Every structure is written in C-alpha cells, then in structure tokens.
Amino acid sequence: MIDAAAVATTPTLTGERIRLVPLGPEHAQALFESLRDAESARLTGTHQTFTREAIDAFCASRADQDDRLDWAIEDAGSGSYAGGLAVNEVDADNETAGFRIDLVPAYQGRGIGPEAIELMLAYLFEEVGVHRVGLEVYAFNPRAQRSYEKAGFVVEGRLRDSLLWAGERVDTVVMGLLRPDWLARRKT
C-alpha cells in the first residue's frame, strides 16, 4: 500500500557523495542553466525551451505538490547542483511510480547517477511502498540504459519511433524494477 504522506513531502536523502534535497527556489538558476545544455536536451528528448520565469515558478511550486517528489541532486562536499531527480506518475491503486533523472555535464560519468537512483529506490520501496518503478530511456542513450540495468532495471519493451529528434525517429526503451527484485539485489 502506498503511503501518501511519504509522497506529500519530499525528504532529504543523504548518500556518500551526494544529497537529494527538495527542489526549491534556490535551485532555479542552476536548473535553468542545465536546461540550456543541448546534449542534455537531446538525451531527455526535450524539445521545448524554458524561460527563467517559468523555471522560477516551477521551482517555487515544488513544495506545494503532494503527488510527486522533486529532488535537486547536490554534491555533498560543495553543495553544488549536480542535477535533478523527479518521481512522477505515482499510482496508489497499482503501487507504481515513474522517474526521470538528469545530471549536469560536470557530474556525468562520475557515478553520481547510480548513487542518486539507489537513494531514491530505497525511499520508494521502503517508505512509499511502491511495487514497481518504471522509466523510459531513448535508444540513442545506451550509456544510461546500461546504468539503469546495473541498478536492476530490466527492459520491458519498446515504443517504436516515439521521438522525432533532428529529423530522425528514435525508439523509447521502457524499463522497470520490481520490489522483490530490488530486495533480492540488496541481499547479495
């Protein structure tokens, strides 16, 4: 059973090298800058551009959301913004949730993503009570797919030609992780 209170307020989660902290107004500038990175936009399939005002409003509204979790990923040593992680599509009836993660270029390839994902999974499976966590990754991002597989996610299917990027149609790879599989991995 989903614990709605565990979704209503985003907690701070602390790892060895990072902290997941509630996304708020203090992260607006860093988030705005990260959204302007062309490669990050491609990897996330983000066609739209965002104004600073829209990002300010988004960050200011996160504390009012009671149906999703929005975290800033911060470097535990410096407090620098390393990226964002959002849990969305929480379905209490089916005990499922989806998520997305993005890292700023300076923090990519340093093992920050897997640490953030593991913190999030522990919270979702142990505190929120989800049974399944799902995600989507574009086929032109095999590095991310391998990272998700290392975290225990399995490929469940493909949405063919679901993204049109720079004139090329790209598949979406659908992945998921179930609580029993995650628990079994934690014991080894």
Image: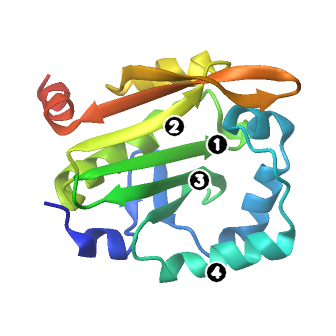
The kind of secondary structure element at disc 1 is strand
Which class describes the residues within 10 Å of circle 3: few (<14), some (14-19), or many (20+)? many
* Left or right: residue 40 compared with residue 111: right
Badge 3 is on which residue? Answer: 84
Residue on which disc 2 sits = 113
Query: Toward which corner of the image does residue 81 lie, by quadrant?
Result: bottom right
Mark 1 or mark 2, which is nearer the start of the sequence?
A: 1
- Marks 2 and 3, how far apart at CA: 10 Å
Q: Is residue 32 above or below residue 101?
A: below
- Between residue 187 and residue 63, name the one nearer to us: 63
Instruction: State how far apart marks 4 and 2 are (Cα).
Output: 24 Å
How many numbered marks, from 0 up? 4
User: Which residue shows up at 44% across the image and 55% down it?
Assistant: 87
Q: Distance from label 2 to label 1 (Cα)? A: 7 Å
The reply to whether the C-beta atoms of the residues labelled 2 and 1 are less than 8 Å apart is yes
Decide: few, some or many residues near mark 4? Use Cα within 10 Å; few <14, some 14-19, many ≥20.
some
Above or below, 145 relative to 127: above
How far apart, in angstroms, are the residues tagged by discs 3 and 1?
7 Å
Badge 2, how many Cα within 10 Å: few under 14, some, many 20+?
many
Image point 59% across, 16% down: which residue? 142
Seen at 18% across and 28% down, the residue is 181
Residue ID for mark 4: 60
Element under label 4?
helix
Left or right: where 70 falls relative to 2: right
Q: Residue at x 81, y 45 (%)?
A: 47
* Residue highlighted by disc 1: 103
Left or right relative to 180: residue 9: right
Q: Nearer the viewer, mark 4 or mark 1?
A: 4
- Establish if 7 lies above or below 85: below
